Image (cartoon, grey):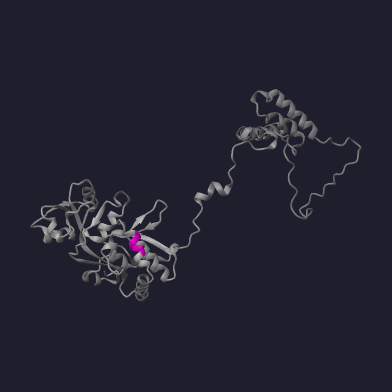
Amino acid sequence: MPPPREAGPLAGALTAVLVRDPEARPDTDTLDRLLAEAESAERVPEPADGEPSDARPEDPDTSTSYRIAPPAPAPAPRRVRKTWLAAVGAVALTGVLAWTLWPDGGADGQAGDKPSVSPSASTSSLSPSTSRTPSLTVGFRFQPGFGGRQPDGTITGLDADVARYLARALGHDSADIAWKEVTSVDRERLLSSGEVDLVVAAYAMTDRRAEQVDFVGPYLTAHQDVLLRADDTAVTREADLRDKSVCSATGSGSAENALAKIRTWASVKGRYTYEQCVEDLASGAVDAVTTDNALLAGYAAQDPYRGKFKLAGFRWSDERYGVGLPKGSPLRARIEAALKAMVADGSWAAAVEKNLPLLRTTHSGGSPTG
């Protein structure tokens, strides 16, 4: 370690105790001797009798003889060597720890091969985010083809693309959007309470819901349909489902529609989720899956199933998906205009093609109402 430059008489003692090799450090007697030598070098000899002194004569001991503060009492005699010993011991302990942990011993005053970490690098993960405060809260739901999340947190899907287009039309960019997941039971409540500014979440427009919220759209009209394996050439019309096994989610409206439509000549199999139905279709456990074609296209667009399925093209019902707004929202007219612009400039058709490619065969003219 480089010798201390400002240690004065203590330089020798400090240099001795701060060596890296423990075997080379002085024992107690040697350290005591080094401290005694430092103490002798530090002490200033008092003037002999008769020699002039620079000390000023004491002021008279009166209550008004001092100008600023009363004279401080004379300091008590100190045990210099023990004080230095304690100080040197503390410094030595700190120095030994620092010297021991110093990369490669700090030879020649240079750091070793270990990388140094700057304060900013070590605390960057804890630093507050500098991103803009979100100013538009959008309700969405995770649904294949409509709403998903990439590993980096980016929200994707048709609903996300529609929401971003609307946000830009309202003067916001993607950084302004706060995404809030909604469910089928809380969408109206979240809109009415103002917790979300709008909902784009495969939100079916119904008369009952319109009593509580406003709708703009539709931005997509779906139809009850059937998903088939891509190599299935046996089903081209409804009657071809005779004696076929058709899967739908238990308790869903789609299952009820399917039962009403084909229960006399097809076997309807209930599963808890559509994902299970699609898995059964892929494995050959069932011959078809039925719900609205937009949801079916979303499942078919997932990586494990790309290119494996097709839509039959049946239109047993209409399901209009719209943008939900709080009642009396001032954004309504601007969102209506934005949806029309999205269709006119081709952005809507591009979003459908990207997220729900199977729908391109069932929508004519690139219209949300097709």
Split into 4 quadrants, where in the image is the C terminus?
bottom left
Q: Which of 338 and 196 is in front in this view?
A: 338
What is the residue that sits farthest to the left in this orientation? 264
Q: Is residue 287 on the magenta stretch?
A: no
Task: Tell me which secondary structure the magenta stretch mostly adopts.
Answer: helix
Residue at 55%, 47% in the rendered image? 121
Residue 132: % across, % down: 48, 62
Image height of 122 relative to 19, above or below: below
Residue at 9%, 56% in the rendered image? 265
The quarter holding residue 294 reads bottom left
Please indicate, yes or no, whether residue 153 appears anywhere in the rendered image.
Answer: yes
Image height of 368 relative to 73, above or below: below
Please indicate, yes or no, whether residue 184 appears anywhere in the rendered image.
Answer: no
Residue at 75%, 28% in the rendered image? 36
Magenta region:
350-354
Residue 359: % across, % down: 28, 62
343 displayed left or right of 5: left
Image height of 218 relative to 36, above or below: below
227 displayed left or right of 181: left
Q: How many marks?
A: 0
Residue at 29%, 64% in the rendered image? 187
Q: Nearer the viewer, residue 357 or 263?
A: 357
